[in-house]
Image (cartoon, rainbow, N blue to C red):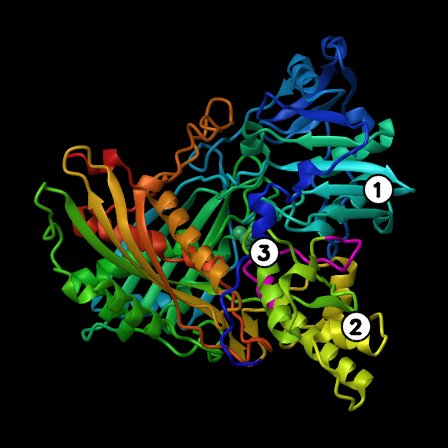
Amino acid sequence: MAGQPLPDIARIDAHDKVRGATRYAADQPLANPLYAMLVPARIAKGTVVSVDASFAERVPGVVRVLTAADFPGVPARQAREGPPPPPPTIVPDVGYRGQPIALVLAETLEAAIEGAEAVDARYRRQSFIPMMDSPGALREPGEEKRAGDGASALKLARHRVDQHYVSPTQHHNPIELLAASAQVQDGRLVVHECTQHSAGVRDVIARSLQLDPARIEVRSPSVGGGFGQKGTPYGHSAIVAQAAMLTGRPVKLVIPRGQIFHLASFRPESHHHVQLGANESGRLTAAVYHAEHEQSPRGLFPPSDYHEAPSRLYDIGDYLGTAANVRIDRQSPGYMRCPHPHPSCFAFESAVDELAAQLGRDPAEFRIANDGRIDPLTGQPYSSRFLEECIVEGARRFGWSGRSAAPRSMTLADGTQVGWGMAVGAYPSMMVPAVATLRVGADGRTRFTGSGHEMGQGIRTSIANVLIQGLGIEPEGLEIVLGDTGAAPQHITAGSWGSAGAVPVAAKAVARMQSALQQLLSGRTVDGNIHRRLASVKRPFIEIEVTEVAPGQTSEALQSLRRGAYAVAGPEYPGFTTMSYIAHFVELHVEPRTRRIRMPRAVAIADCGRVISPRTARSQIQGGVVWAFSAALREATEVDPRYGGYLNCDLADYVVAVNADIGEIDVGFIDEPDPRANSMGIKGLGEVVMSGASAAIANAVFHATGKRLRSMPIRIEDLLA
Ligand code: MOS
């Protein structure tokens, strides 16, 4: 089934989801549980001198209050080569406002909440740095990304753009809140947590509490929205585990949204200085680009990755990318959908639009004219690249040729300003090793166990499509076990490598199963589907195990996977670089009196290699375009510089796009397999969708209004007067 398009099947989990039967982390039934609530620090930096739990302990139903004294101290610093230190559990040193300082355990959720509000603490306060432009924020250079000599080439350029762009602090707001439960069962610690990284949670609990990871199981079968927030193991997992071990009862914690804003990872504010150069004939020849972002004192989210996509959008042989962390006193920022390319392609693709306008060129045609075949950073070819095809198809579907080029030249009868904008994006296509088992039974059942986490993106449906088509089975008898450290070695599901990590191994399992069946039948012709054939020859089941690695990886990668270590490959593989691509075209309407911006239609065409699950792939793109609209025009977290926390930490005040903001989103795929990337020709999809999408929107704002706005979110006040 290497090359054929796969049919559009329904989501394998749709029926359970709409009936409310899907069990998320907080839905797992527990016998006689304790309900937990964290107590957040009320200072931004300093030390907890003492915790007064006496009032909390008098609240009816409160059973116990845990403080730093109930936890092992911070583990000694790890060896240089080893993993970074685990996130702190409950410790006296406070590094950010909202860090947990105590945990209240109670017979009811209401008592836990009341108890947590009654906990008092005395602190020794220290001065702190809340924002990247606050005095004292330390700028620490990151790695450079270079091709040729960007600075010299820029000096020689005939045409230049030199601009600054800003992407704000933004927070993930999946509907499912962070939640974990822990219980001791038969000498094992069993944790249910909504995470994209069950093995990471297991290992962090083990290291924080000095336990043997082999005695811990973490299960995360269904996550209610992730996109990076649930990829980072947090300290609360070990806190809940310790509470279950100390009390001998199951413990359940659901973290309220306001606390999540303060302790989960988020998209950091980032500043982008982009300088582009072009020669007389309008070829892009030079880029000098500095990106920096807000960063916690020991945070690891790397600033140099802002260059991973912009450097590969065009044939720019001379590219100098510099980057910096700006160290401040808030919690660690991290990966949020399209983590680096969303802000960096907003900046870069706005600058490219400015340059095209300066040169009097059509922005779509200008981009096609500057397309490239070689990765400037490595000198390697791209394994596949259909960016030009994305632009051409997007322009055709959108009707781009009907655009009137001049800003403010398209208005409706009521004075509504119409803007047509476009931009492109790219995202590294990565892959992880995988181990999977497939068991097909004579009883009509099929069970697949593998690495990966379902967070609504559709990984189960992708695996299912390959199994259903390849084995000729019905979805009803099919069970797909994911995100369970007790069932298969698990890798973090992030960076859009979910499908590439789970689907090729599923295809291999299908092939291995078919040959095992042929061997069993040894030439006999037996009628019926695979289950019937097993029944006819009186074989109860066949079970096989298969493994898969990425191009260039060896069995060492499988060992890393089994240990729970990071083993991601790409986008630079031996001999080639693999990126996913997208082209966005949007129409915006700016209301003449209120200046409210809405998007009646958008077209997005993606090159993500072969499409495995058409339905969930389309849905991924629609969701990403919605999020990009929201990120470009609505979302910003307001930091309180006085206290170091966040002011709009709920869904009423953290403004996101609503249905009425967005009309039709037309989605298309090039659907050309990339045979070098993996056996199924898959490239990543989830993240690339947001790459360049915000720039298309900002470019459309310029086209509608004549205002070039370089700071997200672009809001009504930016368009007044
Ligand atoms: Mo993604 S932001 O790496 O879950």
Residue found 60% across the figure and 78% down from its top: 679
Amino acid carrying label 2: it is Ile
Describe the element under mark 1 as helix, strand or loop.
strand
x and y percentages locating residue 403 in the rendered image = 15, 61
Is residue 641 placed above or below 143 in the rendered structure?
above
Residue denoted by label 1? 189
Instruction: Please identify the quarter of the rendering in which residue 371 is found.
Output: bottom left
Residue found 65% across the figure and 55% down from its top: 492
Based on the picture, tell me whether residue 486 belongs to the magenta stretch: yes
Q: Is mark 3 within 8 Å of ligand 1?
A: yes
Instruction: Please identify the quarter of the rendering in which residue 435 is found.
Output: bottom right
Of labels 1 and 3, earlier in sequence is: 1
Q: CA distance from mark 2 to mark 1?
A: 29 Å
x and y percentages locating residue 213 in the rendered image = 83, 49
For the C terminus, the image quarter is: top left
Q: Nearer the viewer, mark 2 or mark 1?
A: 2
Q: Nearer the viewer, mark 2 or mark 3?
A: 2
Amino acid carrying label 1: it is Leu
Q: Nearer the viewer, mark 1 or mark 3?
A: 1
For residue 494, the mark is: 3
Q: CA distance from mark 1 to mark 3?
A: 25 Å
- The foreground one among 442 and 452 is 442
**Crowd tier of the residue under label 1, counting other residues whose Cα lies within 10 Å: few below 14, some 14–19, many 20 or above:** many
Describe the element under mark 3 as helix, strand or loop.
loop
Of labels 2 and 3, earlier in sequence is: 3
